Amino acid sequence: MLIVAGHARRPVSSIGTTDQLRRNNLSNILGLLHRNGPFSRAELTRMTGLNRSTIGAVVGDLTDLRLVYERMPERVTRAGRPSPVVHIDDRSVAIAVNPEVDAVHVGLVALGGQVLKHVRVETAKTPSAEQVVKLATTAIADILAGQDRELRVVGVGVAVPGQVRLSDGRLREATHMGWFEQPLAAMFERSTGYPACAANAAVLAMRAESTFGAVRDVDDLVYIIGGASGIGGGVLTGGRLLTGTDGYAGEFGHTFVRSGGAACHCGARGCFEAEVTQQQLLDSVGLQAAGADRLAAALAKSTDPQVAELVAHSLDLLGIVVRNAVNLFNPKVVMLSGFLAALHRAARDDSALVGEAIRSARESVRIQDAALGADQLMVGAAEIVFDELIADPAACVALNAQTV
């Protein structure tokens, strides 16, 4: 069982009142469809162990809540009456926000993980928290006004490049942004009128990959992402997120990689994210920040010896971080994302990254690039919103009855 951030699958056979069992069944079936796509009623019956009449009642309730719909399969491969296929109704949506040092990303994500819209609002300089809320609120209004159908907004999820306290979602520090002690979720709630929650961006990106991406069945994972606002990451061990006391675990960007190195925003010297930056790599091949998705191809095409030297040096430092991660956590997969995935593609082989790790640990690990690309953070931010909906669909729909 994969438990990434706060929502676990509830046991179908939980002992309790009829209403409790109904809520559990609604939660289980909706979560199953959200994470895995459509299933027939017959498949849901086999997968959950519930009887046909109970599945029929649950699907009926979810249909009435406008969370799922049914249609007959296009192809019938076996004799007998075909079982209706249950699909997620994508009219329930979450708003996703990811502030960076040079832009604010705003997206509209449907239940089921599909990104319906993703816009990048560029900023002339690093925005303040107040400016991010204002820019995002305007973008949200524009996105929703441009939709040609009725949607139900469940809430706003904010993926923050900084330390967010697990207990209450308060931003403690985002050093690249120059933010400290900001009640970001509350600020978004006041500005947009929707419920809002915030969490560390890297952890949310990892969650997106674990739920919908390339490591859906991996329970022991180290995830490291590099972007405009630095380097972060997360760790899954035994299917559970390693959080630390307050939720700040996984800061791979602050791994010490060089004695007497560059000054870091955190106040130390020689941190990985101070020594290896997206901007350095973009500048080396003449790309702007908006063209970061073309970095891997540009590095591969370059014949400039200075670019080759920068890539080699950056890979050496990335290797220190990966080696430490493999030795400490013994993961099945080390996943690289953002500009670190671009660096990985420039490497001749993975031995440069894991060759100096403990032999017994490196024998079973693989290095893998993230699969969801630019949509990672949008999907991850939406997941913390959909947690509430999936945990108790009827109650959440009643609370978020407003449609746009």
Image: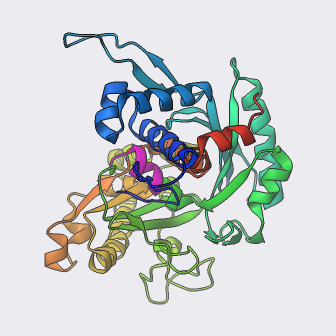
Q: Main secondary structure of the magenta part?
A: helix
- Residue at (69%, 27%) from the top-left corner? 151
> Is 175 left or right of 304, judged from the image as shown?
right
Where is residue 287? Give x, y as percent. 53, 47
- Residue at (58%, 81%) from the top-left corner? 263
Where is residue 3? Give x, y as percent. 43, 59
Name the residue at the front extreme: 17
Nearest to the observer: residue 16 or residue 342: 16
User: Would residue 396 be visible to someone looking at this image?
Assistant: yes
As drawn, 340 above or below 293: below
Where is residue 198? Give x, y as percent. 66, 59
When asked about the image quadrant of residue 258, the answer is: bottom left
Locate the N terminus by quadrant: bottom left
Nearest to the observer: residue 26 or residue 160: 26
Q: Which residues are magenta?
A: 206-214
As drawn, 240 above or below 146: below
> Is 323 left or right of 68, judged from the image as shown?
left
